[in-house]
Structure formats: C-alpha cells, structure tokens
Image (cartoon, helix red, strand yellow):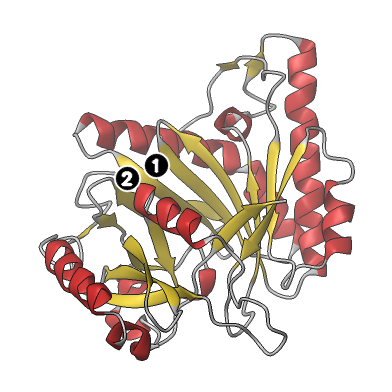
Amino acid sequence: MSNFIKNTPEAQSWINKAILHHSQKGAFGKVISGIIWTNSKNDAGEIIVPVDPVELVNQINNDPFILLHSHDPGKPLGQVLESAYFENKFDEKFIVAILAFYAGGEILKFQELGLDTKISVLSPKVLPTLSDDIWIDFGTDPREVDIEWVKQVIEDAPLPINQLDLSHNSAELAQELIRVGVVFLLLVWNPFVTKIATEAGKDTYAALHKWFKKLLKKLADRKNPILDIQTFQDNCQVSFLFRSKDIKISYEGHDKLPDAAAQAAQFIAKLKAREMPVKRLIYEFDQETLKWFPSYAVLYDDRIITDNSMLIALEQIPMGLSLGITTKK
C-alpha cells in the first residue's frame, strides 16, 4: 500500500499537512495516515471494497467515523477524522484517511464529571402517539448474518423496514453485528409507568416491544451476536448493546431498557448544559450485575468520556483495522 503514496507526491503533501493539523488536538494521543480504499481488484476481477470513493470521502468528512476494534461498537480506538481521494499516472486510485487514537490523549471520566452512572432514572409518565411516518432501520453484513435468518426476523415487523447492508471488511468474522435503528420515544416507553395519548398509540408501542423480544430470542441462533439498538436524542447517536445469547438475560436487559434510555437522555442534557454536547453515547448491559451502564461517550470536540481505561489502552490497538460501511438496499 505504501507504493500508492510514493507514486503520488500530492498525497504525501496532503498527509503531512493533515497530520500536523490534527495532532494539535489534545483529544488524541496518536495521529497517523492509512489507505482505506483502492481500485485494486480480487482474483475475480472485482473491486475489493465495492463503494463509490467520492461518496465515502464525503461521508467521512461530513461525519467522522468512530474507529472500532473488529467493528465492535463497544470497543472504541479513535476516529477516522478526514479523508481525501487521489489518482496517479499509474492508474492507481485510492483514499487516504487520517486515523486518530484515543490512547495517550485527554480521557474524561463520568465520575469526575459528576455523572452518577449507578443512579436510576425513571421513564416519562406520558408519551405522545408515534407518528405514522416512522420505520425501523435493520442492518447486517450478509457475510456474517445469513439472509434467511434476517427474513425470519423482519417478516412480521410492526413498522416498515429500511434494510441496510453493512460492510465490515474484516479479515476475521469475530462477531455478528446486527444494527437496529428506531426512534428514541420507543425506548423510554415503560408499559407499567407510561401513558400514551391514545389506545392505538399504546398498541404500536406494545407491538414494537413484542417484536424486539422476538429478535432477542432469535439471537440464540447466532454464534457470537452483538445487537446494537441505535437511536438519536438531542443530536446525539445513542446505542444500547445486547451481547448475550441467553434469552433470560436478554429479556432482563429489554425490561430495564426504558430506565437506561431515560438516564441517557438526562446525561445528554446535563453535558449540553455545561457546553459539552455529546455526539455519541454507548450503553452496555452487564450480564453479571444485570444492569445497564454507559460504556463511553464521545463529545463534539472529539474528547472521549469513559470510566473503563481498558477501552482505550494503547496495547489494544491492532495492526490491521476494519472500516464499517453502510449501504442501503
């Protein structure tokens, strides 16, 4: 891959300027460059990563990617901050990206910020009826999760499904990532506490949670699943991760999800009030304590908040990284 850079002086010049610029941010301990796409082909004559390079560059530059270990949403390493597309006289086409790692940078802690991760926050007492124009995003990598399993899960979904193909491009398929996107209101609904404006609205909330439980039950069919329930709250992308194949544990996580979502909303509001707006917040369900906890948060100024130093340990940075790409079917 280094020959691509050697053959393209303008790429080397861009890399030097970009690394110098991003190295001045205290949020990161190490900033490097890497080639994340080329027009190289496999033995079948197909492009190895079949994406539009211009679209990929725009996507990264408009909304920098979180850099993950083995595309695991719960294991952040840093961010893909910036990218650029190049061509040279040898008909080599490629994308260079600037990769920044959290290890060695400024790490904040929930406890030090006065955010009690053990506090229980109750669900809202009243919620509106869901609008008619909502849907469920459902994303998997077909190389990890077979199409037949996906069909069985989505066939009776109570809302329209927007099916997405994830492309992780990993050398090893260590996990099977299943990503489900829903509106935030759905997650804070508690059937024993929350009132809905209409009975029809209540039926919609109930039907969606019944479908969620079916999905959690189907995780037992997978080898090493990670279910990422993804939503947005006040310009923050929030994820709730289920990892267990044990149906009892998964159902316990589902039943406690409304309180975790309510806590997430509270944390986002508190940090915003301190002029520390959150871009991304990840929750995990502890299979031993049977409780949700915030694994980490990423601020809009790129700093990370986590009480788990192992997440960003320097020795965990792998030699090879995969880049998760999403395409709509």
Figure label count = 2
Amino acid at the residue labelled 1 = Ile
Specify the farthest residue to the front: 89
Place of residue 103 in the rendered image (x, y in percent of width and height, measured from the top left): 25, 73
Along the line of sight, the residue nearer the viewer: 318 or 164: 164
Q: Nearer the viewer, residue 197 or 233?
A: 233
Q: Position of residue 283 (x, y in %)?
A: 48, 52
Q: Give percent across and percent down for residue 19.
A: 18, 70
Q: Which residue is mark 1?
A: 119
Q: Nearer the viewer, residue 271 or 235?
A: 235
Q: Quadrant of residue 194?
A: top right
Between 186 and 181, the one lying in front of the other is: 181
> Image height check: is 21 above or below 262?
below
Q: Which of the 4 image quadrants contains residue 181?
A: top right
Q: Residues within 10 Å of mark 1 (few under 14, many from 20)?
A: few
296 lies above or below 135: below
Q: Residue at x 74, y 57 (%)?
A: 248
Q: Amino acid at mark 2?
A: Asp
Crowdedness of circle 2 by 10 Å Cα count: few (<14), some, many (20+)? few
Identify the residue under disc 2. 116
Q: Residue at x 28, y 44 (%)?
A: 115
Secondary structure, mark 2, is loop
